[in-house]
Image (spheres, rainbow, N blue to C red):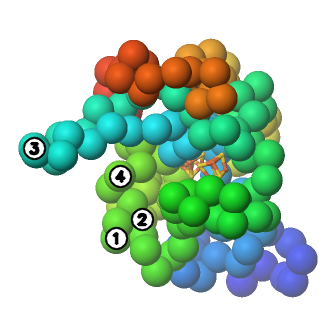
Amino acid sequence: MPKEGKVSPVFWQEKSLAEMDNKEWESLCDRCGLCCLYKIEDEETGAIAHTNVSCRLLDIKTCRCMKYKVRKLLVPDCIILTPQTAGEFKWLPSTCAYRLIAQGKDLPPWHPLKTKNEQSIHKAGISIQKIAVSEREAGDLEDHIIHWQILEE
Ligand code: SF4
Ligand code: SF4
């Protein structure tokens, strides 16, 4: 076990999600912003369409929530991930670190925990940085449907 205050360089390979402390848990997020994009559900068929419209609280440049600590208060639909809900992580993109670890997989090579570079997620083209439009200016969601394999797997 790492000493208190120190994070093992590969803690995600050594611990389950439930065993991680808050710092480790938060560092797992690669800040791709993909979980902050709106989806449209067909009421009759239940089919899901993905859009490039992001939540109004997402800073598209940094892919970070601008009100992270109070996000649930400001956006009641925002889903807060916890180890207890890991079994439901299938709605997340296939690249999401929480989903990967819940499935017993390793992090991808471009994950900032591996590269030690927060920009690597953007350089790898996995984040929403270059594709998102804020809901503040997007208009109809139906006009923003996208097809991206990592969202649909
Ligand atoms: S999809 Fe996963 S890794 Fe990406 S921002 Fe959301 S929680 Fe973080
Ligand atoms: S409130 Fe923040 S974390 Fe939740 S969907 Fe919006 S931008 Fe993402």
Q: Is residue 66 above or below residue 121?
A: below
Between label 2 and label 1, give the one nearer the viewer.
Answer: 1
Label 3 beta carbon less than 8 Å to ligand 2 = no
Element class at badge 1:
helix
Instruction: Identify residue for label 3.
Output: 45
Label 2 beta carbon less than 8 Å to ligand 1 = no
Element class at badge 4:
helix
Element class at badge 2:
helix
Query: At which x and y percent is residue 132?
Result: 58, 23
Res. 142 visible in picture: yes
Spatial CA span between label 1 and label 4:
10 Å
Instruction: Identify residue for label 4.
Output: 91
**Which amino acid type is marked by label 3?**
Thr
Q: Residue at x 39, y 60 (%)?
A: 89
Res. 12 visible in picture: no
**Which amino acid type is marked by label 4?**
Trp
Q: Residue at x 60, y 40 (%)?
A: 55
Spatial CA span between label 2 and label 4:
13 Å
Q: Nearer the viewer, residue 142 or 50?
A: 142
Between label 3 and label 1, give the one nearer the viewer.
Answer: 3
Instruction: Identify residue for label 2.
Output: 102
Q: Nearer the viewer, residue 69 or 96?
A: 69
Instruction: Identify residue for label 1.
Output: 87
Q: Which quarter of the rendered picture does the N terminus lie within?
A: bottom right
Q: Which quarter of the rendered picture does the C terminus lie within?
A: top left
Label 1 beta carbon less than 8 Å to ligand 1 = no
- Of mark 4 and mark 3, the one earlier in the sequence is 3
Q: Residue at x 80, y 46 (%)?
A: 66
Query: At which x and y percent is residue 27?
Result: 72, 57
